[in-house]
Image: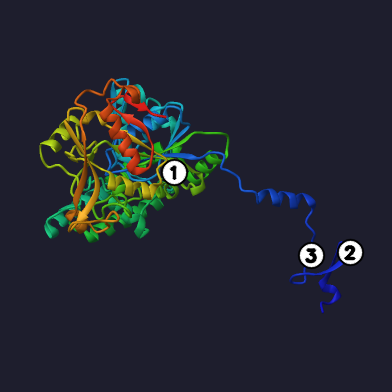
Amino acid sequence: MASDSNVAKVNGRGTSSLNGEPVVKRPRESVSQASSLRIPKEPQNKVTVVLGAQWGDEGKGKVVDLLAMDADIVCRCQGGNNAGHTVVVDSVEYDFHLLPSGVLNKKAVSFIGNGVVIHLPGLFEEAEKNLQKGKGLQGWEERLRISDRAHIVFNFHQAVDGIQEQQRQKQEGKNLGTTKKGIGPAYSSKAARNGLRICDLISDFKVFEDKFRMLAEHFLTMYPNLNIDIDSELQQLKGYAERLRPLVTDGVYFMNKALTGPSKKILVEGANAALLDIDFGTYPFVTSSNCTVGGVCTGLGVPPSYVGRVYGVVKAYTTRVGVGAFPTEQDNEIGALLQSRGREFGVTTGRKRRCGWLDLILVRYAHMVNGFSAIALTKLDILDTLPEIKVGVAYKVDGQCLPSFPANMDVLTEVSVEYETFPGWCCSTEAARSFEELPPQAQNYIRFTEDFLQVPVKWVGVGKSRESIIKLF
């Protein structure tokens, strides 16, 4: 039996206490407050996400630009200046690699999240080049914010990227086809926990310098032929630190304030694409970050419950830059026509893109990973001159249909594709501004895509400008 000293009187009854401390009755207000906390609340604001559903170059920039017109915040969450988005505004073609495409909206804040790796010379050069093209980027520094937790890509990361590609070519006779922008080595530094972040650069520069020299020596040990001018790069970085300081913010607090504060439209612009994702892509011919929907949470500090609509961008055919399996590739006059009509050159590298038919097995797999709310089907007009159009609907190995998208690239290389064939429309779609104005054959092509994926097509792109995007609902 508890002693009198271990009993408290609550409502006239004796109640045993814990650890000899008297039990304190909660005031009524606290009880009601606690009860209200237990009622699930819908987030005040949710992020809208735009992601590539193939191997990149689907036209994400154009869709982002359309949605960014009335957005309050536009974010990048992963990748680096290996990404390339082209946006045409007032007949001016802007090319973005690190800056979110939404930076063209002068009323929106552009945010580069912690999941992005930033090459600072590349960032400022990109801004300068676009400033020379038109007025769209005027005042960009006033509306850009950068997470203090974002990692930095150094010049030696880029040099290492090139050396690694050469080594792969010598050892295996094939490379990964990287952009040589230092993205992989920078993410490697991040994972090895010897990388440096924006917060390091804008803090005590002497401490930063010591860490930088140590990191440079680490790479020199691994690659003795590496050409690094440590003092020159440090001098350059010191100048960037001063320009960066007003732009840097605590990304977690920035996003939390945006999500939980007054009503805001927040847009997230994915870089690269689902089949280039480090986990879910056609490994090892992938990028070094998560460019599927999970990267939004880890790359911005956004809780999953705050992710709203996820839009997948799908080109009306398929392209791929560099090496790697490509089941629906057309290494023939069809591929050459798609490449020519679609102006299929990489924005970042200028490399020719390989071209082929729309692969819906691949897009369905991307939908499984991302859970697309709707699809933007782009560059439909590139198919205008084809008398016959094919769509990949199944993979077979040794005559047997594969039940899922293969993880093993040796298997993917060996698949044969089962196609559905459609009659072409053989007329221009570029003037169409509604679904009804599209040729019946083009309408059927869109409906088949929706039915196969069980995802609605919300936008159809039939040209380069904002006005050429048809909204279906």
Q: Earlier in the sequence, mark 3 or mark 1?
A: 3
Classify 10 Å Cα crowding around label 3: few (below 14), some (14-19), many (20 and above): some
Classify 10 Å Cα crowding around label 1: few (below 14), some (14-19), many (20 and above): many
The amino acid sitting under disc 1 is: Ser
Mark 3, mark 1: which one is toward the viewer?
3
- Outermost residue, right direction? 12
> Image point 65% across, 51% down: which residue?
38
Q: Earlier in the sequence, mark 2 or mark 1?
A: 2
Q: Vertical placement of 19 versus 191: above or below?
A: below
Mark 3, mark 2: which one is toward the viewer?
2
* Residue 386 % position (x, y): 17, 31
Residue at image mark 1: 147
The amino acid sitting under disc 2 is: Gly
Which residue is at the front of the view, 119 or 283?
Answer: 283
Task: Give me the C-alpha separation between circle 2 and circle 1.
Answer: 56 Å
Which residue is at the front of the view, 369 or 162?
Answer: 369
Residue at image mark 3: 23
Q: Vertical placement of 378 versus 235: above or below?
A: above
The amino acid sitting under disc 3 is: Val
| Tag 3 and tag 1, C-beta contact below 8 Å | no
Q: Earlier in the sequence, mark 3 or mark 2?
A: 2
* Residue 18 % position (x, y): 74, 70
Q: Is residue 400 left or right of residue 47?
A: left
Residue at image mark 2: 12
> Image point 32% across, 47% down: which residue?
364
